[in-house]
Image: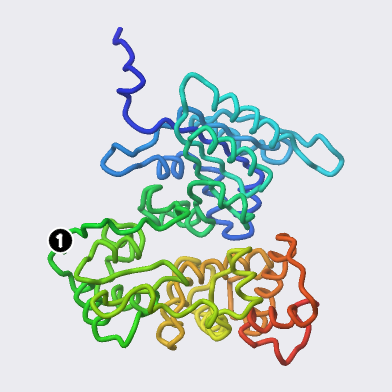
Amino acid sequence: MTEPLHQSRRPGIRAAMFVDFDNVYTGLMALDPAADKRFAEDPKHWTEALADGVAGEDSRRFLIRNCYLNPVIYSKYRPYWTRAGFRVIDCPSLTQRGKSSTDINLVLDAMDALSGAAHIEEFFVASADADFTSLIQRFRAADRMTTVIAAGAVAFAYREMADSVVESHDFVAVLNGSAAESIHTVASPKQQPAPAAGKPKPKPASPAVRELVAFVRSAPGPVAGAMVAHRALTADPSLKTDWGGAGKFGAWVAQIGQDVDYSPAQSGWVWDAQRFSAEDLPAPASLQPAIEEQIIRVTDVPALSSDQFRQVFLSLETKLREHPGNRVELSKAVRDDCVAAGQPVSRAAVNFVLQGLGYAGVPLTGALPAPELAAAWTINVEELCRVALMEFDDAEKLALRRWASGGLLEDKPGAAAE
């Protein structure tokens, strides 16, 4: 019999996956029922997508795969998970209010894994439930990597405690097979890595690089990242998959060189380093009034101006007729339409708005007027503020509604609160 490899010689990062089935399933159902079905019936597909690494050395071996579900409601999905190599733990409702025992079972198993002989290096928790914040804190204290897979609104403290977060829209893309990236490009790290002191030599210029460099060098100042990304994608549509292997737009810009700099601040900026620096970026205070700045800092609502939000809803009203039910194509189309209208908005910001509309119960399946979309989104923002325990006076509430709705509700005072 072949002797097993010593632990240090086994390929891949030793990882553990803990899935709060009920939480993820209900979250995905509100966002994309088709993706929800794939999550429940084909866990092997998306687990392998998250396990794949770069050049093999960063791939993951899920030594532990646990799924916690309520057997009274979701027992029909058990065979799919056991067949995919998951250990399924029944967590029936133990109270009259329907609260299951998932939290305590998941935490106990995770703590056992943390202190186990396998020395798990990275913990994945598939749940948007902020009750797991303390668990993630324990992982960090033990110097273990943590990744949260969210299928719903994520509390700020929970998000910040994790090393990386697979956002709802990115998880939906993985489930729908429209994201070929590994976890390195799907998960969103807490900080954008700074470019190395010695920048790499530029590669042979592609059409997208030539377009970017020419555009930035002729600009009168730093340019919004969304506008630069739109021009690059127009010049080279193949970059849409994973930005030439860089995964993210910012990482792609950082490796170009040629005195082009990038900052993720305020939704992203690109500039000619020979003429400008980070000090030339617009001051946040001039872009964001006090109430917006507070909300953005606490709730993760995109840092958009009122005019940008207004354009998102106007573009969404138009594009919903062309891409009903297709979240991936819809977000691209809305992003491109906003750029064309002179109000550049990143695709991540558009996805955040679409996600919020889903939580507000808006079916993105047909034509909806912009004011109706703005009203639903504003309700979602108000709910995010409520969950974050933010309190406002009447004047601040009015300012919130005017900003979040892009001014589309100004003719209907208090409409968002109805």
Residue at the far right in the pictured view: 96
Question: Where residue 338 appears, x then y in whole percent?
Answer: 46, 82
Q: In this view, does 101 lie to the left or right of 370?
A: right
Which quadrant of the figure contains the N terminus? top left
Q: In this view, does 282 lie to the left or right of 409?
A: left
Which quadrant of the figure contains the C terminus? bottom right
Residue at the far left in the pictured view: 204
**Residue tagged by mark 1?**
201
Image vertical order of residue 332 relative to residue 40, above or below: below
Image vertical order of residue 315 relative to residue 178, above or below: below
Question: Where residue 197 appears, x then y in whole percent?
Answer: 25, 57
Q: Front-most of 291 and 24?
A: 291
Is residue 7 among the parts visible in the rendering?
yes
Question: Where residue 216 appears, x then y in whole percent?
Answer: 27, 80
Residue at the far top in the pictured view: 1
Q: Residue at x 66, y 48 (%)?
A: 130
Image vertical order of residue 156 relative to residue 54, above or below: below
- Colour convention of the picture: rainbow
Q: Residue at x 51, y 51 (%)?
A: 165
**Picture quadrant where residue 370 is located:** bottom right
Q: Front-most of 27 and 219?
A: 219
